[in-house]
Image (cartoon, coloured by chain):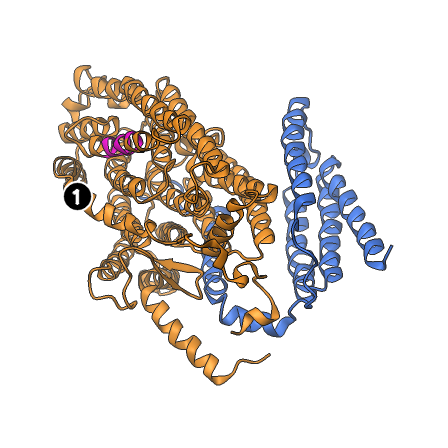
Chain colours: A orange, B blue
Amino acid sequence: MFPTPSFVERVSTDLQRDLLAFLPELILCATIVALLLARLVTPLSRKHLGSFALLASGCALAFAICFWPERSAPIGSVPLSGNVEGFSSLLVFDTFGLYLRVFLLVFLCCSLWLSLLTGIPDAEDSADYYTLVIGGILGMMLMASANHLLMAFVAVEMASVPSYALAGFLKGRRQGSEAALKYVVYGASASGVMLYGISLLAGTFGTGSMPLISRAVAVASLGEGPTLPVLAGSICILIGLGFKLSAVPFHFWCPDVFSGAAAEVGAFLSVASKAAALALTARFLFVFSGSSRTGPDDLSGSALALGWAFMAAVTATFGNLAALAQTNIKRMLAYSTIAHAGIMMMALVAVGPRSVGPLLYYISGYLLMNLGAFAIVALVRNRTGSENLDAFRGLIRRAPLLAVGMSIFLLSLLGMPPLVGFAAKFQVFAVLYETGRDLGGHDGMIAWVYFGLLVVAALNTAISAGYYLKLVKVMTLEDPADPSPIRVSIGSGALVSILAGLVLAAGVFWNPLTQYANRASQSFDLAPKFEKPAKIPKDAVRPAIGPKGKIK
Amino acid sequence: MSLDVVLFTAIASAIAFSALAVVFSRNIVRSALWLLFTLIGVSLLYFLLGAEFVGATQLIVYVGGTMVLVVFGVMLTAQQQFLKIRIRPQEWLVAGILASALFVLLVTTSFHLGEGKNSPPAEPMPGSGPLGVGFLTQYLLPFEIISVHLLVVLIGAAYLARAKRRPGGNRD
């Protein structure tokens, strides 16, 4: 029962390597503890801890960038395609995960900077707010690199539960509390459904490890195809992920939560949470598309893809149609988030390196433009006390910088060239077209699904012009009810200008970001191979917890 | 019929009955108490399966800890208007449809579970020793990271529960 010395030695060498690769996450953990301890020290107990949190996240970001695959890698080396498994293969370090880790940390830094500028939280609540935000980001980073269903579930919970508290962060407001409560109830049921799915899959395959499951699915697809428990399990997991993505019909929480929570929290939920959920979905769908690459006439892969395509199309269309009628800007942005989630889900219909690159580009562009839009909503709210369309009336006369910035972000969300939104949408459209064209040869029906999605996506862009351009018109062409100018602090101006500049720059020069995204997507290229499924080792389907399996 | 089957039937029906009672009682305190029996029943199922460690954990954590908190929470917050739960017919309808869909899905899939496998594994469930080694070796990451998660959640809960000292404090 007790481990031998050689076993302990091997475990500790592995652990050292893994912990080194895990350094950014460890820094965040330490920051959480430090934020709490700071409250015990009298001189710090009343201080605003935002700058400390920002500094620590900056540190984590620097380390995450240091671990970029092509640099000197303390992890050993993360290969460009394929991956390195860490923590006894519970996590996976690959370019995809490392890209998203950097992305999430960039978002964390931007969002902490924004919170310093807008004054939510105040000094008294700052420790709590930053603990929740950093804790949530930590969960999302784990979501992006989960390699085991157990880890995936833990990570989803780590990302969700702080979000529930953040949704109700503005206390004493009925709307905020209602939003938090709704979010908790929906979120708990979605987690429950996801857990059902996970236990079905783990029970069927005798393991939670995603590569092993992928292999077993591939083997099964050569025989009679996936059994009912596997299908039911994967559908349950996709329902749980669909909730995180606010995909229709699991989107009910999204508008209420966004309009009830502070705009800063809205940015957190719409950018970081979506990105992490998409990453996990990509990993998960990839596990199940293992089957579809064994043969073109496989049903399960395409059935799953068909359902996913339908959900994506409905999500995008519903989000855009519902956004047309909104007068509260945060509510409008919530529906816009749903619509964008739909477009990003479309990119995942064809899971593979070709579609993951554009998806990563889209997510990165979405960070810039959506964070910018929410930042301006927060800044305008601080000065006018309102988040309705009326507060933006004639904004160009009151705060030209904010109005111009907001117009850039909105036009980018719409997908106007030469902004980043156009580049992102274009790449997703191109993937849909190319996949459809390539499939046209041997599978006409599926090819039409891609062309259909392309049409839906194009129509959606046209619909979304309705509300984005309406807001631009209200800001620029109409007269303000209260013409007094809005004072914009230097820091806020800098944040808005930097984000707007990046939206423009990344839209004009796609190449650097596209290259990074495409390189990151390479890890989806070669991961599992199924040339000779007959040689799958017997222990591929072995109980995860067995007395013999513990100590190898 | 072996003893296993008899015991399982007895425990499972007790769990099902108390779970239904949780849903159908109008009084929230009674619901909480029925939940206690559901959780005890689940821990008995674990014991029946030979997973003593999980069963004991279930007893200690859920029955001993969580349930006491739930009952206290219910009693502290159950004011006059919250004491009785009123459910409108349309809520029954929607919840009923969703729940029965999930029920049908789970029942049909559980009859297909274990298809193609000959026999259950003969090895006994690992005791606390291998589990403990597993926590510190193979499953070290979730074991440790959950403590960070619990810390964060604890702070979130404390934040939501505590009163703001200075309402509308000095916002910039």
Three-letter amino acid code at disc 1? Gly
Quadrant position of the N terminus of chain A in the picture: bottom right
Does the stretch in magenta take in A156?
no
A430 falls in the magenta region = yes
The residue nearer to you, when weighing A393 against B103, is: B103
| Residue A108 falls left or right of residue A138 | left
**Magenta-drawn stretch, dominant element (helix, strand or loop):** helix
The x, y position of residue A442, in whole percent, is 37, 31
Which region of the structure is painted magenta? A424-433
Badge 1 is on which residue? Answer: A491
Q: Is residue B39 visible?
A: yes
Q: Position of residue A310 (x, y in %)?
A: 44, 27
List x then y, in percent, for residue A408. 18, 29
Instruction: Give whichever of B52, B104 is nearer the camera.
Output: B104
Residue B67 in the figure: left or right of residue B162: right
Q: How many marks?
A: 1
Query: Horizontally, is A116 left or right of A134 in the view?
Result: left
**Which residue occupies the extreme right position in the image?**
B1
Q: Chain of mark 1?
A: A
- Per the image, label 1 sits on a secondary structure element best described as helix
Residue A124 in view: no
